[in-house]
Image (spheres, helix red, strand yellow):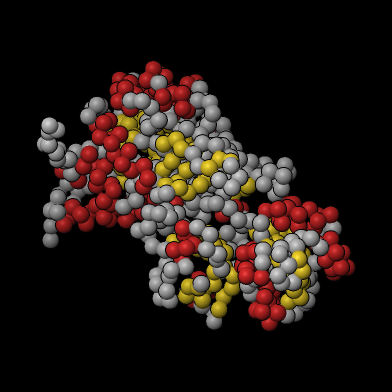
Amino acid sequence: MAASPDLSVDLGGLKLKNPVITASGTFGYGTELTSFYDPSLLGAMIVKGLSLRPMPGNPPPRIVETSCGLLNAIGLANIGIEAFIQEKLPSLAAVRTPIITNIYGHTIEEYAEMAKRIENVDTIAAVEINISCPNVEQGGMAFGADPDSAAMVTDRVVNNTTKPVIVKLTPNVTDICTIASAVESAGAQAISVTNTLLGMAVDVATRRPKLANTIGGLSGPAIKPIALYLVHKAVTTVRIPVIGLGGIMDYQDALEFLLVGARAIQVGTANFVNPKAPIEIINGLTDFCEREHISNINQIIGALETNNVSSK
Amino acid sequence: MGFRSESLASLTKPGQFFMIHLARTTRDPLLRRPFSIHGIQDGNRLMILYNVVGKGTSLLSTLREGDPISVLGPLGNGFTLPRPHERALLVAGGMGIAPLFFLTQALREVQRHRIKMILGFPTSQEVVLTDQLRDLDVDLSLTTEDGSLGIKGLATDHLDQHLAQELTESPVVYACGPIPMLRKVAKKAGAFHLRCYVSLESHMACGLGICQGCAVKPTKSTDKPYYYVCQDGPVFPAEMIDWEAL
């Protein structure tokens, strides 16, 4: 029998046993879904976005389902970085997969402070910076939409930690390539493409927005084609690894992102529907590689064939 | 509709819910929907009650006997039963009858006290489970908004009278239904100093405490900024909820 395919990938210094990562905000603090599977099976886990101080989140309604998608305005409700490190992280000590914290600041100084705090925590393997969450009025959006401020945040985090820094980009910009290049130059080891797309839904009967926050971030299969396109643009622009996400529900979705050139993928909204989705995707990728006689997943990454059709 | 599982039937308490999906491959509707269990039949069939209101429930209505569904549960806390000597007063609006019917079933297994239930539906068309409730020896007060069955009006229209009548027994009040109804029940029960539990409905993406979509505002007395219906509820003591924010 042939050896099982090698699914391991390298994210700029961060080695993963497989390319499947749980996305921030859809995997809690890493402790909630352990009854469904052993998180050590994951390529990595990214825990819920953390801020320097606890955040209450937005008033309800916070979520609404739209066609093939989920519109949310959670408002980054979280217990704060200190409570995460003190109360949640110890119970993840036995997890044999990189734990990546997603951080979010209201000011550049807050990002820097969180990077410093994380630096001394051995169980945290890497940090993903959220410069793109569209839900909170101040901060987030402004950093991710402007190349200079995106670079500034990245630079401050990189200079305050020796851990790999991943920057999660927002799709709500005119040109994602400028932002991608800016954070690459500022020292990001990888980028995650993409966060949610800004969206809205209206209740016709009440003539009000369905979300209390009026606008929210759209995720799920509805955004997958856009996410794929943005990953496609990003991989042709930067040299650092790109982590693809946006509407990945099964291993075939994951393959699309890998073929386009994503070095790894994140599973987000799918966790809500099927808590075992990441594991099924890992198994699906393994089976696919075996079926196709692919010994190493890196043979798939970026293996997109181009259509040589010239328009006349 | 029902689904069969002996182990789940023995695990599930009144007030708990399941996240249900037709099949995992569905992209639209994308998310599971929360349904409370309205009773256990034949010891192994978990029953759910639904109205066709949207895409999810209309697909659900196309299922035939034996079709597979994907269920996640039991989830949530469930009702705290009254103490053996205590009576229960139930207030249900529309589909809110579902968890209260299960509660009635469970109560009948442990006590024979009179159970009073105030039930409201829009019209006689929507009225369900009343025969079964009478079989369980429940004292029903039925209202319909159009007066096509029972008393015309809302379940809460004569709440004062009902509560005053029952007051000497100081019953525990259990309510499930639309928010305006629950708000009124909570207020009146508070005024009469009766213990009151409400089962809340909410949009939720996961039911597992991860998405944090099902937030409800607590009263100021807690240090939590929000409760989550799926984890802290769906059943709450009425005084824990900030009814003005709901």
> Would you say B60 lies left or right of A289 here?
right
Tell me the quarter of the image containing the N terminus of chain A: bottom left
Residue ID at (47%, 43%): A71
Q: How many marks?
A: 0
In this view, A93 is above or below B18: above
Percent position of residue A36, x then y: 42, 58
> Would you say A5 lies left or right of B38 here?
left
Image quarter of residue B156: bottom right
Tell me the quarter of the image containing the C terminus of chain A: top left
Residue ID at (40%, 49%): A68
Residue A292 seen in this snapshot: yes
Percent position of residue A206, x then y: 61, 45
Residue B79 seen in this snapshot: no
Q: Nearer the viewer, residue A155 or B189?
A: B189
Image quarter of residue A146: top left
Residue ID at (80%, 58%): B189
Percent position of residue A270, x then y: 39, 50
> Would you say B206 lies left or right of A185 here?
right
In this view, B182 is above or below A130: below
Q: Nearer the viewer, residue A311 or B80?
A: A311
Residue ID at (75%, 62%): B153
Q: Nearer the viewer, residue A95 or A276?
A: A276
Percent position of residue A106, x then y: 52, 25
